[in-house]
Image: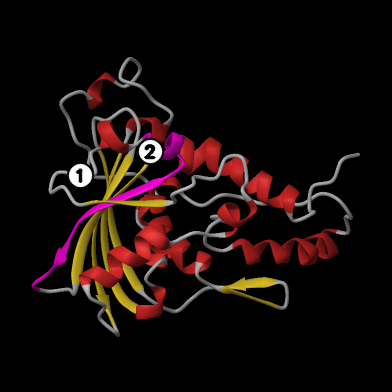
Amino acid sequence: MVIPEINPEHIEVIEAQRKRLGTKTGFIAVKPNCSIQSYVPALNALLDFKPTEVVASTYQAISGAGKNFTDWPEMLDNVIPYIGGEEEKSEQEPLRIWGHVADGEIVKASSPVITTQCIRVPVTDGHLATVFVKFENKPSKEEIIQRWSQFAGRPQELGLPSAPKQFITYFEEENRPQTNLDRNIERGMGVSVGRLREDSLYDYKFVGLSHNTLRGAAGGAVLIAELLKAEGYIQPK
């Protein structure tokens, strides 16, 4: 389970997977849940400050359910405060992504503790998240924004075709990111964040946005394939 900018080293488990299955060429590599990509990259850039608690609510587009407004008319002028299985995945998959490889398996990270709510909203594309986070070593607002603006990973280093040049874009405007305006940033492969401010219960809160069918689904899968090819796991016949 890979977000190429965050845990490319996890593709090491392919060798153990092949050994277990008795194969030499085939393997299974998957992308994580599309909703977590609206906030996990932003948190990942801040791991040095040791986030300990995260509260995230995701506001997810109907295309995440494979629907449009024509075949899901009950979503018009409506919000549904439940998406089956989504909260469990949103709380556990980040820990798997932040885990480490040991004896050919992924050992999940033990922190931060994450709790989520996942809500379906009347939007065509784009998953938005509101996030509250507490740190062991609280950074300054300037340090956070600097980490976001400078964050890059293996896809940017390799110059992969689908990789966004600017992975995380921070908006200073109070009313950004907006789903309709910002979901297509970096051809839909970038992540947007904004409204970073201190919180009365947690250290900081912010808003994140990603395109669920580009970054989160099809484009994310293509980027993983590009990474696997660049790292020699996909070879021509």
Q: Position of residue 10 (x, y in %)?
A: 64, 65
Between the residue at mark 2 and the residue at mark 1, the CA separation in whole angstroms equals 12 Å
- Residue 151 in the image: above or below residue 193: below
Indicate yes or no whether the magenta region holds residue 143. no
Q: Residue at x 53, y 55 (%)?
A: 3
Single out the residue that lies furthest toward the bottom. Answer: 136
Q: Tell me: 30 left or right of 19.
A: left
Check residue 140 in the rendering and tell me which mark sits there, or answer none: none
Q: Residue at x 30, y 37 (%)?
A: 182
Question: What's the amino acid at mark 2?
Answer: Ile
Pick the quarter of the image with the C terminus.
top right
- Residue 204 in the image: above or below residue 78: below
Check residue 185 in the rendering and tell me which mark sits there, or answer none: 2
Q: Tell me: 218 left or right of 94.
A: right
Please, what secondary structure does the residue beneath circle 1 have?
loop
The residue lying toward the viewer, choosing from 26 and 231, is 231
Q: Position of residue 159 (x, y in %)?
A: 61, 48
Q: Tell me: 88 left or right of 121.
A: right
Check disc 1 and report the residue beneath it. Answer: 176
Tell me which segment is drawn in magenta.
184-200
Instruction: Say whether residue 83 is visible.
Output: yes
**Label 1 environment density (alpha carbons within 10 Å; few <14, some 14–19, many ≥20):** some
Q: Which badge, 2 or 1, comes first in the chain's sequence?
A: 1
Pick the quarter of the image with the N terminus.
bottom right
Q: Residue at x 78, y 67 (%)?
A: 16
Please, what secondary structure does the residue beneath circle 2 have?
helix
Instruction: Say whether residue 50 is visible.
Output: no
